[in-house]
Amino acid sequence: MEKQPHKLPKYLRVDPICINKINQLHPSLITHALDIYYDCRKNCIPLHILWTKRTYEEQDLLYKFGRTLPGNMLTTKRGGYSPHNYGLAIDFCFEKNGKYLLYDDIETYPRYKNFWMDIVFRFESLGWTSGWRWPSFEPGHIENLLGKSILEHKNEQHKKNWIDGFGNL
């Protein structure tokens, strides 16, 4: 009788969607994020990457929630002014039994709070900033502006777009 392959529990499996999202980050940040993601999976921490890079249009749509669209405010940044627009930020949560758990959802899972802080501390030790420490308290957001301001990133992107567009004439 042929032996059936052992199926890893879901919390240990690597999610190709999360890997794809991590690979959309700025090239200088991918290795840090992948190392932390793989280490979390190896250590049974159910880290899930919700979002990394997004377009100005996606950012503007999120900005409308709680303002011109019904629902809660999801962001304080318009398109072009978010680190997500430049692949400099990650929004994360945990996944348990097919459900996504934000920080407010883990009250009933005390060890998950420790896991959450472990993730925050790992990224911070590599130079990232955590929304955990902000007055606006965004515990599932981490970013690394690579020593520049958002306006500097925006201006660089604008120049690149202009040069790329000029080359297509």
Image: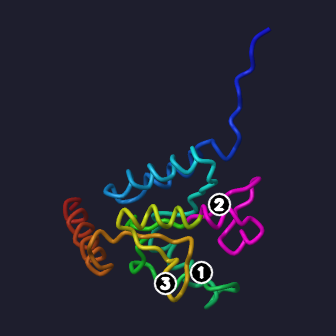
Find out whether the residues at labels 2 and 3 contact each other: C-beta distance under 8 Å. no
* Magenta span contains residue 35: no
Quadrant location of residue 153? Answer: bottom left
Where is residue 159? Give x, y as percent: 22, 71
In the rendered image, the residue lying farthest to the top is 1
Q: Is residue 134 left or right of residue 25?
A: right
Image mark for residue 74? 1
The quarter in which the C terminus is drawn is bottom left
- CA separation, marks 2 and 1? 18 Å
User: SS class of the residue under badge 3?
Assistant: loop
Circle nearer the N terminus (2, 1)? 1
Find out whether the residues at labels 2 and 1 contact each other: C-beta distance under 8 Å. no
Where is residue 98? Give x, y as percent: 75, 54
Question: Where does label 3 land, which residue?
Answer: 134
Query: Which amino acid, mark 3?
Result: Trp
Q: Is residue 100 above or below residue 72?
A: above
Q: Nearer the viewer, residue 114 or 103?
A: 114
The quarter in which the N terminus is drawn is top right
Query: Which amino acid, mark 2?
Result: Phe
**Pair 2/1: label in front:** 2
Question: Where does label 2 land, which residue?
Answer: 94
